Amino acid sequence: MTTTVGTGAARPRLIRTLNEQLLLEEMRGNGPVSRTELATASGLSKPTVGLALASLERDELVEHAGRRAGGRGRSASLYEIRKDAGFVLGLDVGREFVRGAVADLGGTVRVRESRPARSSSGVARVRELASLADELLRDAAVERDGTLLHTVVGSPGVVEPDGRTLRLAPNLPGWERPGVLRELRSLLGDETTIENDVDAAAVAERDHGHGRDVATFAFVSVGTGIGMGLVLDGKLHRGAHGAAGEIAFLPFSGGPLESAASGAAVVKAAREAGARPRSARNVFAAAAAGDERAREVVAGEATVVAHALASIVAVVDPELIVLGGGIGRAPGFADEVTSQLARISPVVPDVRPSALGDDAVVDGCLAVGGDELWDRVLSSRVA
């Protein structure tokens, strides 16, 4: 026996849903707009726009934003996305710092915080991150229950396909242990996404930094370790297994690239040269002050990074390479790398230090979370 499903009532409801989604998309990222402007941009009639706006107002996704004065005739009523209809919590977990921020549905950052990391084990680090999250949400006056909330954690490594564990995160002891992600989601909520930290920084660079001007670029972070985020035709490229950009594991002089291109490698090279620096930052400061041994160490680091970039250029041929991380953003380092790259690569793209600073990963998490939260808003119209 065949059952026929009636579509008479469903079709108008679907049309209303599509109209509301269309208006939400038109309003996203824009300031207050009038019904007339929405009708022109969407191609819908003014009465249809009015009905859709009324529905969105009832569901507290859109709000009245005053009137536009000036011109002839009656002033126009203005509407905008209700920013407090949803929030994104972005967190960056590193070996030395934990950072975070909360942004609303309109993309405005409500609060930021950064603090030194104090935990040495995976479980303790999870609780430290959860404590920071609680403080951020409290300061932003965001309630976990009853508020549309999405959390994105920027972390070294790659999430396994089953979503239960991380791998390739050796710089965070205990972070790859089974149960860490489960505990993280238990404390932060089910709507929690784990994003590779360098990929997140690449998204931030695409949306807010030098990447806005190009379609294809590589974001290479050099600091505690080395990693890459790759944007192709404006979209983040993750790879078949989520491991695109894990250049730390490229073979280099008998070992992984990270053993030669990282803060620890810089300190080791300086000590082998007879200096006694406490950190890579000390080495770069000494080089800037004219210390010849430190200059040679920095030049050696630039050569290693240039060889890594030459491999990227040969495979991807990006328009731009952005250097992030404490070493990548060091004054003059991008110029030194460019000079070394010109000696070994037939093509030399523009190489620039990141313009975003220490909050690049958090800002990328907010961008990723904003897109995911927005998808939830749109899909909610179907329910």
Image (cartoon, rainbow, N blue to C red):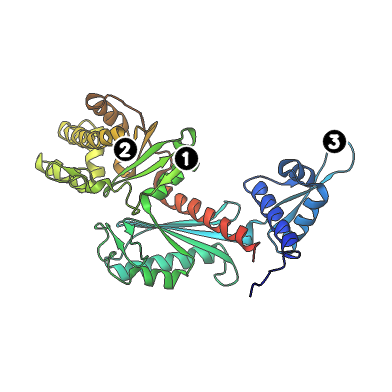
Depth order, front residue of 14/147 = 14
Q: Write down the residue under mark 2.
A: 330
Spot occupied by residue 71 in the image (x, y as percentages of width and height): 85, 35
Question: What number is the disc on residue 234?
Answer: 1
Ranked by sequence position, the earlier of labels 1 and 3 is: 3
Q: Which amino acid type corresponds to the residue marked 3 in the rendered image?
A: Gly
Q: Quadrant of residue 285?
A: top left
Whether residue 170 is visible: yes
Decide: is 73 above or below 150: above
Depth order, front residue of 44/356 = 44
Spot occupied by residue 141 in the image (x, y as percentages of width and height): 58, 65
Say which residue appears at 35% left-offset and 28% top-offset: 349
Say which residue appears at 26% left-offset and 43% top-offset: 281
Quote the CA–CA distance across marks 3 and 2: 52 Å
Quote the CA–CA distance across marks 1 and 3: 39 Å
Q: Which amino acid type corresponds to the residue marked 1 in the rendered image?
A: Gly
Looking at the image, residue 277 sits to the left or right of residue 45; the answer is left
Q: Which amino acid type corresponds to the residue marked 2 in the rendered image?
A: Ala
Quote the CA–CA distance across marks 2 and 1: 27 Å
Whether residue 279 is visible: no
Q: Write down the residue under mark 3.
A: 71
Most extreme residue toward the front, as rendered?
1
